[in-house]
Amino acid sequence: MTPDVNNSRPQIAILVANLPAERDRRVIRECLSLEANGFDVTVIAPRGDKSLHTLPGSRNTRLRPYPIFVYGHGVLSYCVEFAWSFLCIAVRLLVEVFSGRAHAVQVCNPPDVYWPLALLLRALGRPWVFDHHDLCPEIYASRVGTPNKWAFQVLRAFEWLTLRTATEVVATNESFKDNAVRRGVAPERVTVVRNGPTRGEIAEPSETTDPVDAREADHKVVYLGVFGPQDNVEGAVLAAEQLTRRRGRTGWRMVLAGDGESMPALTTLVADRGLTDVVEFTGWLDGQAVDGLLRTATVAIQPDLPTRMNQLSTMAKTVEYLGRGVPVVAVDLLETYRSVGEAGAYVPTGAPEEFAEAIDELLDDPARRAQMGAVGVARFRESLAWEHQADAYVAVWRRLLAKRLPHGVSAPASPAGAAAEMATPQAGDAALAGRPSSAEIEARVTAP
C-alpha cells in the first residue's frame, strides 16, 4: 500500500546501511511501534528479498531498497561500500523529502557518515534522530587488533559529528547515553531504548511440555546472532572442542544460528578441528525459528571478549536468551551484567577452556539452570521486553512531530508506561555497586 502524501499522518524515513530492513529486528520493532501510534514509515536500506515492497508484518511500511555491489573487508573496500551506500541513501532520501514522505528522519549506524545529510535536513526544518546501534570506533579497534591511530581518530570525529548534528539521540543502553553526553550531547536529548523482543514474539510454553525435561533429552548449547570478526564466534567453536574433552561427544551439541562474514572461516575451523558431529550451523533464522530453537536450548553462550566496545554494549542476542529463560554463559562485562544479573554464569577472560568449564557445570546442574532461567524471564518481562522500550521510543517522535499529530493525541498507545519505565531501575542496576562505571571503563580501556 502506498501512503497518501496528503494525509494527516506524520511521515518518518528510517535509514539503514548495514542490513536489509527485513533482517534488522530492532528496526522492524521500531516501525511496528510507529505504525501502531499513528505514523507512516519508509525504510531505506540495502536490498534483501527482491519480492518485498513493504516490511513483513507491517501494515504499510514502505521499503525503498538499494543494491549493494561491494562488501567491505578492508579499508579501501569499506570506503567504497560506504560511499556507494551514502549516495544511494542520499538520492532516495531526497526523493522522499521532496515527495512529502519524510517529515522527519532516523538514521541507524554503522557507519557514522550521514551527518552531512543531517545538516541539510535540519536546515530544511526536519528533525533528525540518530539511533545509536554500535560504537563504530570501537568496532574498528576490535576487528583489527591494533588500530591505525589516524583512522581511529577519523572514526571518533565522525561519531562526534553524528551525535552533535542530531536533533535527538536514541541510545541502546545507559553506557551509550553516557558516551553521547561525554561527546557534548545534552542529557535531555538522549533517550535510552534497549534492544529486545516483544512478549508476543515469545510463544507461551506448551501446557503438556516440561521445558526442563525437554532440554534434558539432548543438551543444546546455543549461539544466536551475527558471525563477524568482533563477535568471537570462533571462541564458541573452541569451547565446544574443550567440552568434548570434558563430556565426550554424545548427549550434547552446539548450535550456531546466524550468518556473517566469518561463516567461511568458522565452517573451516569446525572441519579442521573434527567437530562436525557436535557443532551445527542453522543459517539465518526468522523470528518463529529463533523462538523454536531457544525453547529447546539448555544453555546459551555469549562469547564476546572484554573489549571496550563489548563492555559498553548490550548484545541483542542476550535479551533473546533471557526472554526464553535460557541461562547465559558470558564474560563478566558491564552492560551484560546490567541486563543479565544472576541469570548468567560469568567467566573472567573469555578463554575457550573457561567457557567450557562454565557450560559443563551448568549442564550437570538442572536446579541451578532452572533458577537462572526464572531470573532471566523475570528480568525480561519486568523491564527488558520491547513493550517497555516502545513507549520511550514513540515519545521521542511525539515530541518532535507534535504539530503534525492529530489534535489531542499525546500519549503512546503501547501497553507499558514510559513514565513508569523511567522511574523503575533498570535490570541489574542494584547489583552493580562496586563495579566500574562506563566512564571508568572509558578511562581504563583506551584505544590509541
Image (cartoon, helix red, strand yellow):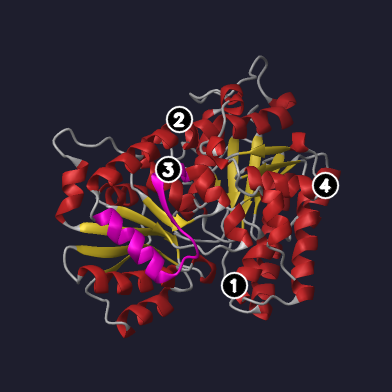
Disc with the residue nearer the chain's start (3 vs 4): 4
Q: Residues within 10 Å of mark 2 (few under 14, many from 20)?
A: some
Residue at image position (13%, 35%) is 208
Give the amino acid type for the residue marked by disc 2 in the picture: Glu
Give the amino acid type for the residue marked by disc 4 in the picture: Gly
Disc with the residue nearer the chain's start (2 vs 1): 1
Residue at image position (78%, 48%) is 182
**Outermost residue toward the top in this view:** 408
- Give me the disc on residue 184: 4
Mark 3, residue position: 342
Could you tell me how far apart the alpha carbons at marks 3 and 4 are, in whole angstroms?
34 Å
Left or right: 213, with 179 as reference point: left
Magenta stretch: dominant secondary structure: helix
Disc with the residue nearer the chain's start (4 vs 1): 1
Q: Position of residue 313 (x, y in %)?
A: 58, 53
Q: Position of residue 179 (x, y in %)?
A: 72, 50
